[in-house]
Image (cartoon, rainbow, N blue to C red):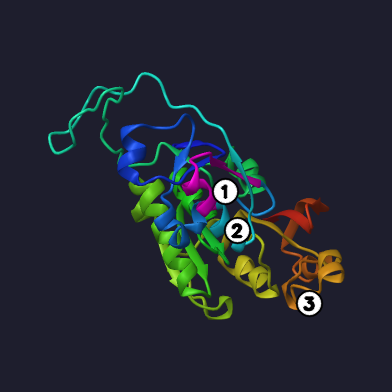
Amino acid sequence: MSLCELADLLDPRPCSEAAACPILRACNIPLTELPKRMQELPAKGTVLKVCDLGVLAGDTVMLLEDRGYECAIVPFEYENGFSEYRAENEPEAVEGVVWRSTPKIPRYRLWAPNEFLMSVVGSIEPGKAADLGCGSGRDAVALADLGWHVEAVDILPDAIEKGKSLLKRYAPQAVSRVKWQACDINAYVAKMRSFQLIVSNLFFDAFVLRLAADLLTPGGLLVSETFTETHRERHGTPHEKRVVTRQAFEAYPIFQVEHWSEDWTGDRHLARVVARKG
């Protein structure tokens, strides 16, 4: 994977300031841009560390906590050995700071694709994949970065736009490998055929199985990490149609379930499934 290095520290300074004087192992997302770039943050449930930048850190934490994130303001260190390169249109260096050009691709990221999915595809030769219920596109972007050609589908146009932004910012070399569709899963018409992989994470519908049975090549995989009946019984969501059950797979004997496990991850009860089309 060629994505930039994963970090756990948020630098909310303006881009020009962060580029001029980088903070060690910190991902820069300016506070003014955060409301439109929430898809670049880690999943909720983990503590988001914010660089102790005084009032700016406090304002950042207030915004994030209003949106349901747990935050901590932490000390930080500036990087050593700054690049001596400075573009002609950049400001002159000031005492104690060597200016550097702003990289085209972020040096660090806070978000990560689905860990279970990445463990499955790590040994598979990239081919064609469909991400059904792709949300803000983290898995689609990671798959494209690995060389997969992906159709990413979600009912929310806003989620699709977030996915496009994530792809352009973090994997610009793979922009042509993702085709986005904003539609209900029941209205999805595949642009490609003969997929080697279909993904459905934190979303499930019996129609996913029907699509996978139709669109996967023999030997192709359906991979899902999604909510169970146990989760629904505890929280009341998602509604019954959206939880995964073994009975749903039994209705499609064309699939051989190669992996099934269930457990709690924080307050979510999730099933992790790998099914191969015969």
**Magenta residues, as a range?**
47-60
- Secondary structure beneath dot 2 equals strand
Tell me the quarter of the image containing the C terminus: bottom right
Point out the frontmost of discs 2 and 3.
3
Mark 2 to mark 1: distance in Å?
12 Å
Between discs 2 and 3, the one toward the N terminus = 2
Q: Which residue is the site of mark 2?
A: 199
Q: Nearer the viewer, residue 113 or 246?
A: 113
* Dot 2 and dot 1 residues touching (CB under 8 Å): no
Point out the frontmost of discs 2 and 1.
1
The numbered mark at residue 113 is 1
Question: Residue placed at 58% from the left, 67% from the top?
Answer: 133
Crowding at dot 1, Cα within 10 Å, few <14 / some 14-19 / many 20+, comes out as some
The numbered mark at residue 240 is 3
Question: Residue placed at 41% from the left, 36% from the top?
Answer: 107
Whether residue 214 appears in this view of the structure is yes
Between discs 2 and 1, the one toward the N terminus = 1
Between discs 1 and 3, the one toward the N terminus = 1
Mark 2 to mark 3: distance in Å?
20 Å
Magenta stretch holds residue 119: no
- Secondary structure beneath dot 1 equals loop
Whether residue 278 appears in this view of the structure is no
Position of 74 with respect to 21 (left or right) is: right
Question: Residue placed at 35% from the left, 41% from the top?
Answer: 105
x and y, in percent, of residue 233 in the image: 87, 70
User: Which quadrant of the figure has residue 275?
Assistant: bottom right
Mark 1 to mark 3: distance in Å?
26 Å
